[in-house]
Image (cartoon, grey):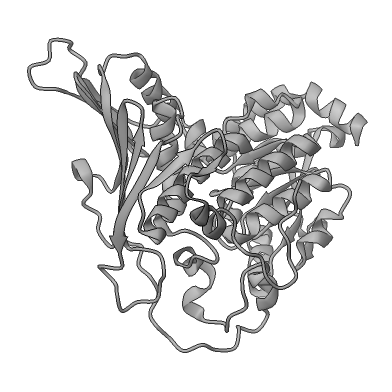
Amino acid sequence: MNSRRDFLHKSAMLTGSAVLASALNTRGFALFKNRIAPSDQVNIGAIGINGMGWSDTMAALKVPGVNLIAICDVDKNVLAARMKDLAKMNYNTSKVKQYDDYKALLDQKDIDAVIIGTPDHWHALIMIHACEAGKDVYVEKPVGNSIGECVEMVAAQQRYNRVVQAGQWQRSQQHFRDAVDFVQSGQLGNIRTVKVWCYQGWMKPGPIVPDSAPPAGVNYAAWLGPAKTVPFNSSRFHFNFRWFWDYAGGLMTDWGVHLLDYGLLGMKSPVPKTISALGGRFAYPDLYEETPDTLTTIYEFDGFNMVWDSAMGIDNGSYNRDHGIAYIGNNGTLILNRGGWEVIEEGGSKNKVSKPFVKPSDNGLDQHWVNFIDVVKSRKMDDLRCPIQAAAHVATVAQMGNIAYRSGKKLEWNEAGNAFTDHAINKQYLTKEYHNGYKLPKV
């Protein structure tokens, strides 16, 4: 494996042609990829392939030299559907092994890197075990489902020296990076408020339905994993896991880690001093969810505040955008989201900082995968756009907001101790209890 790694890093420059490859049709792309020497290819396995995990897999396959050789899911129906998808792409499915146990996939020696696209409550365990197995990792966001998990994930990357990229692909999209450069240029003047919002009209909880047997082909016990055992309910399954504390953290951790990340980056990633939050199930009290459909969180930093504002079932957010980050300065306000960015000058300002709307010029997910594969080959960890340390930081900040909401308290954070000043809150919320014989490894 070491000689293979040495050879891979010499060819890192080949991934620079990924943009060309993404434009090729499937057959042409296959011919292009076949010209790359076997020793210069990166073999990947995908764990959790029902949603974003499969989007990540498709983005990975656009990068020259990347081969999918294994897939894993606890739902055999999903496995079958993905094999059909690959066949439609004229992909050689005979080379793709199927698993329903991720540890068996990790035992496959010729896998170099894995994708983790499972529900959030599985991210930490699989990432740590993958690092132990000598695999590089692309893990979906939020990287951890608790602050304690984030700590152990960072420790695992450091101990095993693996390449670990988090799926916060906005970090690889050029217009986001350009906007942050403008924020940090000082042209906006003193920034005293950063607004971060997520209004998602299409996102609604599932209906209240009776518990039932799991669908045929679903290993429900494996899906639950370290979460406490409860009867199967279709409104908690697949996409809707996001709205239950055992598995995720609602919009705050689903979209929040993307958006809060840029709020923190623009202000050079400080840690909040205090956190307070108010919200509830105001829009859909009769639907099946635990996380709030409406939430406002205030993070206090030295010299400015950051406000998180989220709502399910509404699209008309701040500045007539359904999501975004606004850096509000004395001279003007920069508004940034996936659609682009602009600067609105403050009335009466003499600094002439207004900037017309800038549209995206690239595909952030594709570029994020180019970056990951580059680093898998080069082993230059500092080149990662979203290393586990950065992802753990923003996931921790998002968890702080949820903990403030759930506890109903204004919380103070002790940066030196990496914990809240309230010991009772730490005991209850810093790390989730694991069940069914699972334990969070202490790395």
135, 34: nearer the viewer: 135
27, 119: nearer the viewer: 119
Q: Is residue 144 above or below residue 360?
A: below
Screen quadrant of the N terminus: top right
Name the spot of residue 189 as percent of width and height, x first.
25, 16
Name the spot of residue 356 as percent of width and height, x first.
23, 23
Name the spot of residue 139 as percent of width and height, x first.
63, 47
Residue at (45% x, 48% y) in the render = 400
Residue 218 visible from this viewpoint: no
| Left or right, residue 260 beside residue 279 | right
164, 202: nearer the viewer: 164
| Left or right, residue 241 beside residue 15 | left
Q: Is residue 360 above or below residue 186?
A: below
Q: Is residue 309 above or below residue 162?
A: below
| Left or right, residue 138 beside residue 323 | right
Q: Residue furthest top?
A: 350
206, 82: nearer the viewer: 206
What is the count of numbered marks?
Answer: 0
Residue at (7% x, 17% y) in the render = 348
Residue at (67% x, 50% y) in the render = 115
Residue 239 visible from this viewpoint: yes
Screen quadrant of the C terminus: top right
When asked about the image quadrant of residue 119, the answer is: bottom right
Name the spot of residue 183 as percent of width and height, x first.
34, 21
